[in-house]
Image (cartoon, grey):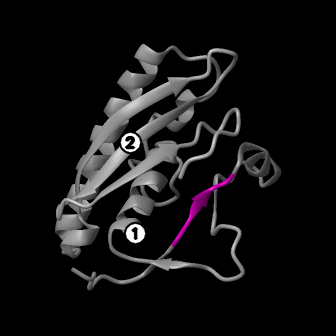
């Protein structure tokens, strides 16, 4: 079913070296000649990633927006601790997004159903990890993503 929702601008996580060069800003509109408009499941996925990678307390108008996950990529972290932080953060974002989706009556393809943690790969040689997730809307459309670690410059997608 085609989305009846409004378009949003597509954002992408910046590689670590670019984030440092831009005063710690983690997102861009991508390396495209023009900005890309998204709606439907990809709009929902963009919203999910932005919330997961925003440190809680840093949003200028919503101090509860974001998660503690982004702050965990500051050094070596073991996989058990990272899994617990990821699980806690996923649950927090799911709760926030479902409340928002209900309040604003988003179409089903833009409404978050659930998120599953597929794998967490911790870099044994230094700080960093990549978190593999599947984001599922209420229609059942699944999108696999990899959250970048923002330390060693891992890339999501």
Q: Is residue 15 magenta?
A: no
Please provide percent x and percent y for residue 72. Answer: 54, 28
x, y percent for residue 22: 78, 55
On the image, the x and y values in percent for residue 55 come to 51, 42
Say which residue appears at 18% left-offset and 75% top-offset: 105
Which residue corresponds to the image point at 69% horizontal and 16% vertical from the top-left? 125
The answer, for residue 57, to whether it is visible in the render is no
| Residue receiving disc 2 | 133
Q: Is residue 112 above or below residue 150?
A: below
Q: Is residue 104 above or below residue 121?
A: below
Query: Helix, strand, or loop for circle 2?
Result: strand
Q: Residue at x 39, y 59 (%)?
A: 45
* Place of residue 112 in the rendered image (x, y in percent of width and height, measured from the top left): 25, 58
Q: In the rendered structure, which segment of residues is drawn in magenta?
A: 10-14
Q: Nearer the viewer, residue 96 or 120?
A: 120
Indicate the quadrant containing the N terminus: top left, top right, bottom left or bottom right.
Answer: bottom left
Circle 1/circle 2 CB separation < 8 Å:
no
Q: Is residue 155 left or right of residue 6?
A: right
**Residue labelled with disc 1:** 43
Identify the residue at the far right of this view.
Answer: 21
The tag on residue 109 is none
């Amino acid at each position: 079913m085609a989305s009846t929702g409004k378009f949003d601008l597509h954002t992408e996580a910046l590689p670590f070296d670019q984030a440092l060069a831009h005063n710690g800003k983690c997102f861009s509109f991508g390396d495209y000649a023009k900005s890309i408009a998204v709606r439907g499941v990809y709009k929902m996925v963009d919203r999910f990633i932005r919330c997961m990678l925003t440190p809680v307390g840093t949003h200028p108008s919503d101090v509860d927006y974001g998660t503690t996950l982004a702050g965990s990529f500051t050094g070596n972290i073991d996989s058990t601790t990272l899994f617990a932080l990821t699980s806690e953060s996923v649950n927090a974002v799911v709760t926030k997004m479902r409340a928002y989706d209900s309040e604003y009556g988003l179409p089903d393809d833009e409404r978050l159903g659930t998120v599953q943690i597929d794998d967490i790969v911790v870099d044994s040689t230094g700080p960093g990890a990549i978190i593999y997730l599947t984001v599922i809307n209420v229609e059942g459309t699944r999108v696999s993503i990899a959250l970048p670690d923002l330390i060693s410059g891992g890339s999501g997608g």
